[in-house]
Amino acid sequence: MKKHKLKRPKGYDDSPLTNEELKTARPLRDVFPDLAAYSRQRARKGEAKKQAVSMRLSPRVLSYFKSKGAGWQTRIDRALLAFVEAAE
């Protein structure tokens, strides 16, 4: 079997960042806010985990939450949690 050598893009540099480069680094939440929000949504070890369910939603509700981008299931969960907390 032939081994394929990994071809790196032209100008690729995998050397460690210098102290000067580290000083100019910006937080993930500033550069990629959606990705940072998603990473914060994960349950920490020992926290209650979510349960997988199957439910039917109206097309209007589904299209609204999906139109806001990635994390639409989490936004639905948060909206339902807010409803439950208000009702209690």
Image (cartoon, helix red, strand yellow):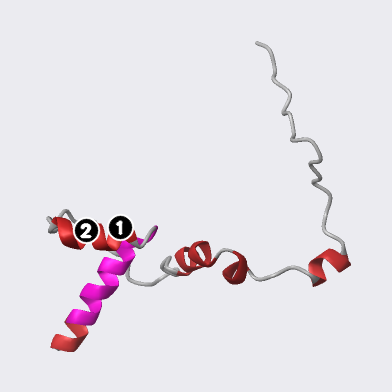
Quadrant of residue 24 within the rendered picture: bottom right
Could you tell me residue 14's position as x and y percent?
79, 46
Amino acid under disc 2: Leu
- Image quarter of the N terminus: top right
Q: Secondary structure at mark 2?
A: helix
* Res. 29 visible in picture: yes
For the stretch drawn in magenta, the main secondary structure is helix
4 part of magenta stretch: no
Quadrant of residue 60 within the rendered picture: bottom left
Give the label on residue 66, or none: 1
Quadrant of residue 68 within the rendered picture: bottom left
Name which residue lies at 80% across and 67% down. Answer: 22
Q: Residues within 10 Å of mark 1 (few under 14, many from 20)?
A: some
Q: Residues within 10 Å of mark 2 (few under 14, many from 20)?
A: some
Instruction: Confirm or deny contact between disc 2 and disc 1 (CB under 8 A).
Output: yes
Q: Give the total number of marks visible in the rendering.
A: 2
In-front residue for pair 80/51: 80
Q: Is residue 13 left or right of residue 30?
A: right
Could you tell me residue 79's position as x and y percent?
25, 74
Q: Which residues are the magenta region?
A: 70-83
Name which residue lies at 48% across and 64% down. Answer: 34
Could you tell me residue 73's position as x and y percent?
30, 61
Q: Is residue 85 left or right of residue 20?
A: left
Give the label on residue 62, or none: 2
Q: Secondary structure at mark 1?
A: helix
Amino acid under disc 1: Lys
Could you tell me residue 11's position as x and y percent?
81, 40
Name which residue lies at 38% across and 72% down. Answer: 47
Q: CA distance from mark 2 to mark 1?
A: 6 Å
- Image quarter of the C terminus: bottom left
